[in-house]
Image (cartoon, helix red, strand yellow):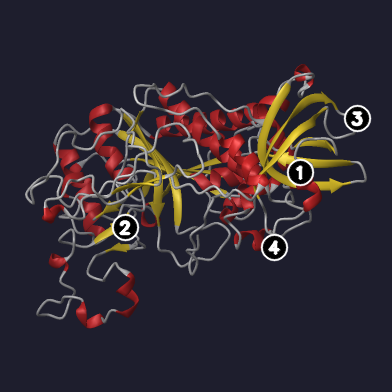
């Protein structure tokens, strides 16, 4: 059992006072004290925070104890302060926080002052002129002149940088002269807000003290020049520091927040649908298999095919697998959501889904997020009304709360996107030319298509009275095509069983889904929305790989 104790607030780093908490149950079989593994670099007796205890009063643990061989991990703080670096000394002073000793309470959490808080108001910071503030972030640009230096700092809270004006008499200016501060470095800057004499911002920070928190190597790839998005995909761990991907991240966050807000305000219950499943919601067979029959350790690449257990017929023996049968990463949480809609009425899921489709287009990902509401006692009309209201709600939320980022997209990504997002809805029609319909026939307006042929739709969609179409609908939007796909679900047991037989799907796999039609079935409907496509629609980003932090595509699982 490895235990590391760390107070909730930042620990103070003192020279020669760092502590290590290492595995203290190593010698349990010898009967030694469970704390014999604790080591300190000081001669003082160890002081434990009062809010963290591991089996207090227990000096020995028997082999049959529940705690035996159990591993617990927390954050460990290991400090080593060098006496020779003045910069490190300054950093130490910056990082110092009050001790959390025995009997003391954890300090109250307070929201950090962000650049967005300083510059985001209607006065763009003019109401803070004269205030002394601290800004923490990363250096975007640095212009060193004879007697003054201009440093642009961004903390990710908004598109705008804070222009920091550093005179040679500022404390820490030697870090500028020595080159410790450069593009990409992280800094702590203190100064007074003053009206800016230059263009581009109304206020700037007149620096009195600057500290380099983390230096940046000269090889830092994101400089003040135009960089292709293809290149940035190879630097996905650094691309959030660019204007484009910082803005995409904030809008994505706003869309996620608005999603939960919309459904919660309308009485929906959020459901956590499983990621591992034994059923295929879409029936397309494009699923990632989850198995332990292949070694999961580093030796997997060296394992032999012959080690996979087989039946007498030469087939894979799934009974020896972890779940006792084939299991997969889910392509949708819909079927699980339907079970809870049959008890809670209106529910929704919002989580990752996976599809093993070998497609390298700008519209497909192997891992993506889905929003899937299910409405009980509802038909297709209710479904379309919900989808329309949801889309209008989240778009309006972004336009109202991400104005700076949306102006950026409107200028640099897709001119006119703000006007396009002032949604005007077209009429219902039957067609499969998605982008042509929205961009040409309906002049850029979203369109809902209904009543598709049953042959091209999933087994769970309700059969219409004509016997050849299903009560399905797709919402098509400009530049993206299909954004939402939904339907009224088949609530009639005999019809659902017939569809499973038609598509040669194993009814035993869906026994629990069929049970919902046996025990108090009700008309119900729902839809699925690909979250990354929504991000594309709202930001104008063309490639879906730029709408998710770490894209997973065929041949690529980096980061």
Under circle 4, the secondary element is loop
- Rendered location of residue 69, percent (x, y): 17, 52
- Rendered location of residue 79, percent (x, y): 48, 47
Q: Is residue 477 visible?
A: no
Tell me the quarter of the picture where residue 211 sits. Answer: top right
Q: Which residue is mark 3?
A: 197
Q: Is residue 231 visible?
A: yes
Tag in front: 1 or 4:
4
- Please rate how many residues cluster around mark 1, counting C-alpha atoms within 10 Å: few if below 14, some from 14 to 19, many from 20: some
Q: Which residue is mark 2?
A: 283
Sequence-first tag of 1 and 4: 4
221 shown above or below 533: below
- The label on residue 415 is 1
- Please rate how many residues cluster around mark 4, counting C-alpha atoms within 10 Å: few if below 14, some from 14 to 19, many from 20: few
Q: CA distance from mark 3 to mark 1?
A: 30 Å
For the point 60% across and 53% down, the residue is 546
Q: Does the CB distance between marks 2 and 4 fall below 8 Å?
A: no
Tell me the quarter of the picture where residue 86 sits. Answer: top right
- Rendered location of residue 480, percent (x, y): 59, 49
Tell me the quarter of the picture where residue 347 sits. Answer: top left
């Amino acid at each position: 059992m490895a235990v590391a104790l760390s107070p909730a607030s930042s620990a103070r780093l003192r020279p020669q006072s760092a502590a290590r908490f290492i595995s203290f149950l190593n010698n349990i079989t010898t009967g030694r004290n469970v704390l014999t593994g604790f080591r300190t670099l000081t001669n003082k007796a160890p002081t434990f925070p009062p809010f963290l205890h591991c089996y207090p009063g227990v000096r020995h643990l028997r082999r049959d104890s529940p705690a035996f061989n159990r591993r617990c991990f927390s954050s460990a703080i290991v400090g080593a302060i060098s006496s020779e670096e003045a910069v490190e000394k300054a950093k130490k002073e910056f990082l110092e926080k009050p001790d959390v000793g025995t009997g003391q309470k954890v300090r109250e959490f307070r929201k950090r002052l962000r650049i967005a808080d300083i510059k985001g108001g209607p006065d763009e910071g003019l109401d803070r002129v004269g205030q002394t503030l601290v800004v923490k972030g990363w250096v975007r640009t640095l212009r060193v002149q004879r007697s003054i230096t201009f440093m642009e700092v961004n903390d990710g809270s908004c598109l705008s940088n804070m222009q920091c004006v550093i005179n040679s008499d500022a404390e820490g200016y030697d870090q500028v002269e020595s080159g410790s501060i450069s593009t990409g470095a992280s800094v702590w800057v203190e100064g007074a807000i003053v009206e800016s004499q230059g263009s581009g911002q109304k206020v700037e920070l007149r620096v009195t003290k600057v500290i380099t928190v983390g230096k940046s190597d000269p090889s830092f790839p994101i400089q003040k020049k135009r960089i292709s998005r293809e290149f940035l995909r190879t630097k996905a761990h650094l691309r959030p520091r660019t204007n484009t991907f910082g803005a995409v991240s904030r809008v994505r966050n706003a869309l996620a927040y608005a999603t939960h807000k919309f459904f919660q305000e309308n009485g929906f219950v959020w459901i956590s649908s499983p990621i591992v499943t034994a059923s295929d919601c879409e029936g397309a067979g494009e699923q990632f298999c989850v198995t332990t029959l292949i070694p999961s350790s580093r030796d997997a690449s060296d394992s032999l095919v012959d080690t996979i257990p087989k039946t007498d017929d030469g087939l894979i023996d799934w009974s020896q697998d972890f779940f006792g049968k084939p299991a997969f990463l889910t392509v949708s949480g819909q079927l699980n959501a339907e079970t809870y809609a049959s008890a809670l009425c209106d529910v929704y899921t919002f989580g990752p889904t996976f599809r093993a489709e070998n497609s390298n287009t700008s519209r497909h990902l192997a891992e993506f997020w889905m929003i899937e509401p299910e409405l009980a006692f509802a038909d297709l009309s209710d479904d379309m009304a919900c989808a329309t209201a949801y889309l209008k709600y989240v778009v309006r939320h972004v336009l109202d709360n991400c104005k700076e980022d949306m102006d950026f997209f409107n200028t640099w990504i897709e001119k006119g996107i703000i006007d396009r997002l002032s949604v005007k809805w077209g009429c219902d029609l039957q067609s499969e030319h998605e982008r042509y319909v929205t961009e040409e026939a309906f002049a850029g307006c979203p369109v809902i298509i209904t009543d598709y042929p049953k042959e091209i739709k999933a087994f769970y969609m309700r059969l219409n009275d004509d016997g050849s179409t299903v009560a399905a609908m797709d919402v098509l939007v400009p530049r993206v095509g299909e954004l939402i796909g939904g339907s009224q679900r088949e609530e009639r047991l005999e019809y659902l069983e017939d569809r499973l037989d038609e598509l040669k799907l194993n009814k035993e796999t869906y026994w629990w889904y069929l049970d919902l039609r046996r025990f108090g079935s009700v008309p119900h409907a729902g839809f699925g929305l690909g979250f990354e496509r929504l991000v594309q629609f709202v930001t104008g980003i063309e490639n879906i790989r730029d709408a998710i932090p770490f894209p997973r595509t065929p041949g690529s699982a980096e980061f």
